[in-house]
């Protein structure tokens, strides 16, 4: 059970004064916690950390306040000047003065009663805000803070600045955070004394106070001991929970998988190519893992187009040879079906039964698949998340493969572990994840890398083109299509809230259809499954030669004879995404090209991104540049700016702490595997605080 002293932090944020349902919605957009299956709690606000501060310590006096500066002024109120009746466009002005001169405080759409109460004539007040000068006259429009001189203690001279979304006022957020802070109870220390001393970490509560009530600009830096302490706490919680999951799942397994090689040989013989050296190498590593009595937890990393799918297939064939079943999970339905289309015929050649299972299989068809999985008549199943959901039971699942899944947490890992007898697990990704990130996101996973592309690949020529030269592009496309080539045309998703109205995929499709006729197809995320399939099939078969698509094709889609990809509004995509998209071409032996269409004027970062794309095709280089341009967190495509799966730890600042946390976790668990010592009890609290309580549940389940 969760220790009851944490209850106030686990109460919903609406339990805080001033946080109603509307404010709660806005706050949920800024808290760094993963809120996919719960609402924000008071405790989540603790980890909503300021990214900078506003320094209000400057008190130069009215006449010496430079335009644009944030200043705090000690004033005496002289007079109020409300706007003329019925004229709301004239602001309400309050005139006040100090020894150096007079200032007009300006309020639009003001509430007179409020202003009269806040700034009574003749009283001394303190105001803080941005100084402006109009025609030589000093003014301050809507000061950030106004207080009577006797009550100015609460005025934050160093004000932390938090991430905000439209509609959420800084004041409301600050107030909510302040209340959460007040709810932090005195907690037992969970840190190892030696680590704490060497790192000069403050107490948990002190660290939070320091960050939310900074006394100096450096207090809010991720490199400050206060932030580092919290980062360490979070990394430690992560490492402990991963270690607990790993210990438990390793314990569960212990079945060596080997086969006589017959099925694998048949499939190899049916391949129209031979494997690359690194494919062979990865496969040998996987086979070793399968044959070992320890459970496999392996990451297969290979740039787009490096040929991960066939490695997966051969690993699955091996598992079936050993007498079990194998499952391959893809992130999207399109991808699941594409894998199925590739794999099913090859598997059939070796006499294996395959099935596809997504949200779309319904009724009798679904029942039959579920039956087949339960009785074992299906050897290999390919699908989406549905594969590891509740109603699916396997006869004997021994290998689970997860494809192109960047965000693969403990959650999913447990779901998969629960199926079958803790199956061996292989995670495939095209993102060259830095080693430190592998550690944070996956724990101690082994890694295989595909370092070369299949032979005969031609380089992809990448060009950038401003949108106003669209006509040139259309002309060149006409030639290419006449020559029998196929073209992807990628449009960014339209988000209603965006000011800049982008050409939606549907509009672009209509326009291209007008030019090229009925050889232009369309696929986007809001289409029905069957429509998507049909669009993909027609393009693959060559019935359509241009496929207008949103980023639904971003990961994994494989149409080897597509040779041109046009990415519209390329300036709006991140580097990793551009690289993924470009990887849809250059998969055959024909030369390919990638056209990055952009809209002028380009910002500095966008310009740099596009030139990186022009300069290199190397996924590792690109991800390095991506790190530089965007910060590490976003490399994995998560919406937060921090490191994926983490609220306060930022790998670019705290990588050194990760290794320490890992050793710390190992040592702790070797001495106290069930977390029953005094420190163990404190560690359980830590796990709750950082949302790793699944791991605590594992402990009790034994
Ligand atoms: P990714 O690693 O991006 O998932 P895929 O598995 O989709 O790559 O493979 C990309 C393309 O390369 C496919 O068309 C596949 O058939 C082909 N391919 C895979 N391995 C080889 C190989 N050894 N030789 C030639 N082509 C290969
Ligand atoms: Mg793939």
Image (cartoon, rainbow, N blue to C red):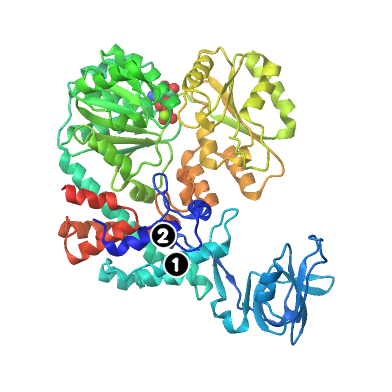
- For residue 244, above or below residue 4: above
Which residue is at the front of the view, 369 or 268? 369
Q: Is residue 203 visible?
A: yes
Which residue is at the front of the view, 560 or 224? 224
Image quarter for ligand 2: top left
Residue 483 in the image: state x and y as whole percent.
63, 14
Q: Residues within 10 Å of mark 1 (few under 14, many from 20)?
A: some
Disc 2, disc 1: CB below 8 Å? yes
Quarter holding the N terminus?
Answer: bottom left
Q: Which mark is residue 179?
A: 1
Q: At 34% across and 18% down in the image, what residue appears?
A: 363
Provide the secondary structure element on which disc 1 rests.
helix
Residue 539 in the image: state x and y as whole percent.
53, 17
Residue 489 in the image: state x and y as whole percent.
60, 26
Residue furthest right in the image: 135
> From the viewer's perspective, is 316 left or right of 470?
left
């Amino acid at each position: 059970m969760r220790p009851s002293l944490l209850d106030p932090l686990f109460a919903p944020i609406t339990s805080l004064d001033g946080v109603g349902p509307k404010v709660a919605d806005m706050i949920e957009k800024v808290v760094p916690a993963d809120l996919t299956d719960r609402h924000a709690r008071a405790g989540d606000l603790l980890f909503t950390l300021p990214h900078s501060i506003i320094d209000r310590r400057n008190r130069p006096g009215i006449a010496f306040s430079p335009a644009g500066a944030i200043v705090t002024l000690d004033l005496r109120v002289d007079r109020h000047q409300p706007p003329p009746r019925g004229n709301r466009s004239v602001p309400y002005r309050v005139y006040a003065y100090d020894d150096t001169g007079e200032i007009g405080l300006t309020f639009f759409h003001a509430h007179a009663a409020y202003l009269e109460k806040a700034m009574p004539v003749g009283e001394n007040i303190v105001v803080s805000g941005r100084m402006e000068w109009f025609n030589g006259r000093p003014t301050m429009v809507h000061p950030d803070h106004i207080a009577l001189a006797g009550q100015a203690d609460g005025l934050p001279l160093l004000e932390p600045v938090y991430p905000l979304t439209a509609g959420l006022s800084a004041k409301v957020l600050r107030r909510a955070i302040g209340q959460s802070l007040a709810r932090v109870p005195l907690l037992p220390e969970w840190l190892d004394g030696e680590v704490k001393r060497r790192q000069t970490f403050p107490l948990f509560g002190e660290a939070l106070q320091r960050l939310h009530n900074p006394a100096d600009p450096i207090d809010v830096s991720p490199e400050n001991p206060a932030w580092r302490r919290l980062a360490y706490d979070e990394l430690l919680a992560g490492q402990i929970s991963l270690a607990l999951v790993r210990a438990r799942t390793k314990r569960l397994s212990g079945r060596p998988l080997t086969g006589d090689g017959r099925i694998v040989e048949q499939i190899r013989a049916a391949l129209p190519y031979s494997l690359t050296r690194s494919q062979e190498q990865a496969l040998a590593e996987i086979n070793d893992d399968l044959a070992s009595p320890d459970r496999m937890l392996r990451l297969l990393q290979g740039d787009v187009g490096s040929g991960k799918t066939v490695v997966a297939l051969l690993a699955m064939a091996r598992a079936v040879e050993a007498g079990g079943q194998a499952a391959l999970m893809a992130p999207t339905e399109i991808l699941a079906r594409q894998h199925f289309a590739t794999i099913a015929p090859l598997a059939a050649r070796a006499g294996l039964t395959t099935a596809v299972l997504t949200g779309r299989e319904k009724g009798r068809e679904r029942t039959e698949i579920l039956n087949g999985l339960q009785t074992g008549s299906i050897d290999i199943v390919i699908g989406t998340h549905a594969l590891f959901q509740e109603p699916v039971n396997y006869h004997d699942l021994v290998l689970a493969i997860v494809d192109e899944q960047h965000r693969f947490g403990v959650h999913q890992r447990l779901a998969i572990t629960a199926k079958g007898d803790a199956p061996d697990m292989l995670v495939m990704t095209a993102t060259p994840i830095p080693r430190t990130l592998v550690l944070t996101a996956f724990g101690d996973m082994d890694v295989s890398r595909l370092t070369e592309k299949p032979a005969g690949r031609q380089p992809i020529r990448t060009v950038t083109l401003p949108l106003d030269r669209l006509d040139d592009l259309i002309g060149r496309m006409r030639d290419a299509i006449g020559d029998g080539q196929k073209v992807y045309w990628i449009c960014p998703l339209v988000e209603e809230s965006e000011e800049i109205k982008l050409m939606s995929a549907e509009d672009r499709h209509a326009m291209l259809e007008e030019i090229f006729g009925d050889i232009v197809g369309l696929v986007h995320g809001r289409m029905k499954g069957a429509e998507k399939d049909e669009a993909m099939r027609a393009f693959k078969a060559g019935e359509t030669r241009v496929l207008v698509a949103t980023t639904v094709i971003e990961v994994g889609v494989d149409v080897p004879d597509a040779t041109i990809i046009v990415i519209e509004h390329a300036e709006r995509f991140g580097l990793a995404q551009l690289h993924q998209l470009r990887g849809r071409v250059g998969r055959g032996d024909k030369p390919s090209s990638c056209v990055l269409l952009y809209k002028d004027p380009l910002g500095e970062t966008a310009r740099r991104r596009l030139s990186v794309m022009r300069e290199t095709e190397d996924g590792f280089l690109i991800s390095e540049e991506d790190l530089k341009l965007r910060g590490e967190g976003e490399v994995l495509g998560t919406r937060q700016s921090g490191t994926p799966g983490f609220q306060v730890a930022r790998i670019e600042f705290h990588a050194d702490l990760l290794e320490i946390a890992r050793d710390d976790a190992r040592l702790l668990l070797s001495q106290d595997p069930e977390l029953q010592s005094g420190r163990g009890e404190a560690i359980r609290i830590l796990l709750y605080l950082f949302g790793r309580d699944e791991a605590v549940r594992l402990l009790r389940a034994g």
